[in-house]
């Protein structure tokens, strides 16, 4: 069963450049995907591919130009009043930067309690008990002591645990984790991923996990969509996509994992010629200029086509 259904979602930004010319950035350019209840759906792709914009659209933080987002049967963009408030409670976000996302003037107790105060009318004692319980669940112990501290008194990993506790306290059905470990020390990344996975399984939550790091993606995910310049170029069961990648862009990403110097690899293989290349192919495959297999027909737009069960690709090499 799907808990999230994204259909033909589009968001373009008009940006004024220094000389007064405005350009259109097609941040999200007509994407569709479904997220199964109780599963982890990974959205992967390099910087600027539209991952965070997709997250903000799903959470109703910004409005789409086109398309729909169905959450638990309701169109997110049409919610208001009570329904919107319930959605704000059921869908939570964990951000990349545990330094920026916590108010430095508030104690951990109040940071974690805040969503509870907004959404539930409990007495202070009950709220505090709830906070201590959730701090223990994210392994911030001793909870009574941690609760009295300010964010600057904690490590990066501990702060991210606070952010997770804050998201968890409302017992959401759905969590979007946008690069939740990329700003943390490598040594604590595994612990935080383990924690997220444990919580997800314990509460049968659904995650949208955003990352540009494919090596951790397989560790947490069930399904994956690879984004490139606002489009999904490949999607499906995570083992199928990562063990048998079809799109030249997915292949390049995967090869880059095992390479100590990915930038260099791109250059050698001629996959990345020039990062600043302008969009000549506004209508065709977005990967055209970087692709070693580019053909004439790639100047038209390839559709996402199912190649095998639970594995789709948008590339003319396969259709
Ligand atoms: N509010 C905005 N106004 C103008 N352009 C925007 C806005 N938000 C995002 N963009 C642009 O849209 C594109 C996609 O941005 P987005 O943040 O979704 O990418 P991302 O995949 O999350 O990248 P990263 O991995 O760096 O976080 C980028 O070119 C970005 O500059
Ligand atoms: Mg982002």
Image (tube, rainbow, N blue to C red):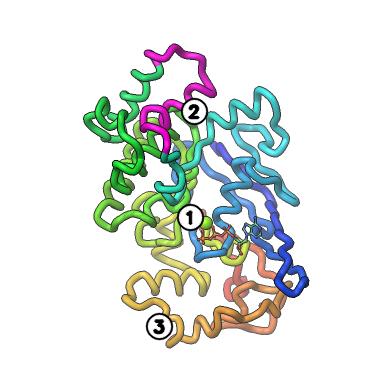
**Quarter of the figure with the C terminus:** bottom right
Mark 2 or mark 1, earlier in chain: 2
- In this view, the residue farthest toward the right is 21
Mark 2: which secondary structure?
A: helix
Query: Residue 286 in the image: x percent, y percent?
Result: 63, 72
Tally of marks: 3
Instruction: Give the mark toward the camera: 2 or 3.
Output: 2
| Label 3 Cα neighbours within 10 Å, binned few <14 / some 14-19 / many ≥20 | few
Residue 236 visible from this viewpoint: no
Determine whether 203 is above or below 233 in the image. above
Residue 205's disc number = none
Residue 255 colored in magenta in the image? no
Query: Residue 28 in the image: x percent, y percent?
Result: 65, 58
**Quarter of the figure with the N terminus:** top right
Instruction: Name the residue located 60 percent from the left edge and 47 percent from the top edge.
Output: 56
Determine whether 33 is above or below 290 in the image. above
Q: CA distance from mark 1 to mark 3?
A: 26 Å
Determine the image quadrant of residue 160.
top left
Instruction: Name the residue located 35 percent from the left edge and 40 percent from the top edge.
Output: 151
Q: CA distance from mark 2 to mark 3?
A: 46 Å
What is the span of residues highlighted in magenta in the rendered image? 105-126
Instruction: Give the mark toward the camera: 1 or 3.
Output: 3
Query: Residue 74 in the image: x percent, y percent?
Result: 66, 32
- In this view, the residue farthest toward the front is 105
Residue 124 colored in magenta in the image? yes
- Residue receiving disc 3: 264
Residue 115's disc number = 2
Report if the CB atoms under discs 2 and 1 are less than 8 Å apart.
no
Residue 224's disc number = 1
Instruction: Name the residue located 71 percent from the left edge and 49 percent from the top edge.
Output: 64
Instruction: Give the mark toward the camera: 2 or 1.
Output: 2
């Amino acid at each position: 069963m799907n808990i999230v259904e994204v259909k033909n979602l589009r968001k373009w930004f008009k940006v004024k450049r220094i000389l007064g010319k405005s350009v259109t950035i097609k941040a999200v350019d007509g994407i569709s995907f479904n997220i199964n209840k109780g599963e982890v759906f990974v959205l992967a792709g390099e910087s600027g591919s539209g991952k965070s914009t997709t997250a903000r659209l799903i959470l109703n933080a910004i409005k789409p130009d086109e398309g729909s987002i169905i959450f638990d049967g309701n169109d997110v963009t049409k919610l208001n009043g009570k329904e919107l408030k319930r959605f704000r409670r059921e869908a939570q976000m964990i951000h990349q930067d545990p330094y920026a996302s916590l108010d430095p003037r508030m104690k951990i107790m109040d940071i974690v309690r805040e969503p509870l105060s907004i959404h539930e009318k409990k007495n202070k004692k009950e709220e505090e008990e709830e906070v201590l319980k959730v701090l223990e669940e994210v392994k911030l112990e001793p909870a009574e002591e941690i609760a009295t501290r300010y964010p600057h008194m904690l490590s990066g990993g501990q702060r991210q645990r606070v952010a997770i506790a804050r998201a968890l306290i409302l017992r959401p059905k759905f969590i979007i984790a946008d690069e939740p470990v990329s700003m943390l020390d490598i040594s604590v990344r595994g612990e935080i991923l383990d924690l997220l996975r444990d919580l997800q399984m314990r509460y049968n939550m659904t995650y949208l996990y955003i990352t540009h790091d494919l090596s951790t993606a397989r560790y947490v995910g069930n399904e994956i969509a690879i984004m490139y310049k606002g489009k999904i170029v490949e999607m499906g069961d995570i083992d199928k996509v990562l063990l048998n990648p079809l799109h030249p862009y997915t292949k390049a990403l995967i090869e880059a994992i095992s390479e100590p110097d990915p930038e260099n690899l791109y250059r050698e293989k001629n996959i990345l010629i020039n990062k600043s290349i302008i969009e000549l192919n506004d209508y065709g495959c977005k990967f055209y200029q970087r692709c070693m297999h580019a053909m004439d027909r790639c100047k038209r737009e390839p559709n996402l086509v199912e190649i095998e069960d639970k594995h789709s690709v948008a590339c003319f090499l396969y259709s």
